Amino acid sequence: MRSFSAMLALVLLSGCASQYVRADGAPIDPAQEKATLAQCKGEGAIAGDPGDLGHKEAAVVTACMARNGYILAR
């Protein structure tokens, strides 16, 4: 079972779509962003390790989103 920190990281990553913006400044297509985030969460789940408290999983999701043109909003 995953630790509380890992679950918290997943909840934070699955929050509202507005946490990401397009790196190129283009408007976000909510359906495309949702599909990309789902794909990236899948990659994160595969890469994640229950012993790393979700850090690797979160890093993989963030990197995947960046590869697809999305960066975390500040």
Image (tube, rainbow, N blue to C red):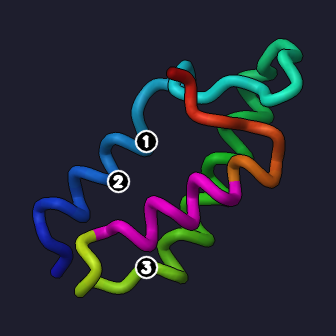
| Position of residue 11 in the picture relative to residue 3 (left or right) | right
Measured in 3D between alpha carbons, the distance from the residue under mark 3 to the one under mark 1, in whole angstroms, is 16 Å
Q: Please name the amino acid that badge 3 sits on.
A: Gly
Magenta-tinted stretch = 54-64
Q: Please name the amino acid that badge 1 sits on.
A: Ser
Main SS, magenta region, reads helix
The mark found on residue 14 in the picture is 1
Residue that appears at 51% across and 26% down: 19
- Label tally: 3
The mark found on residue 45 in the picture is none
Q: Is residue 38 above or below residue 31?
A: below
Q: Which residue is mark 3?
A: 48
Q: Which residue is mark 2?
A: 10
Where does the image place residue 61, in percent across and percent down from the top left? Answer: 57, 58
Sequence-first disc among 3 and 1? 1
Where does the image place residue 43, in percent across and percent down from the top left? Answer: 62, 71
Q: Please name the amino acid that badge 2 sits on.
A: Leu
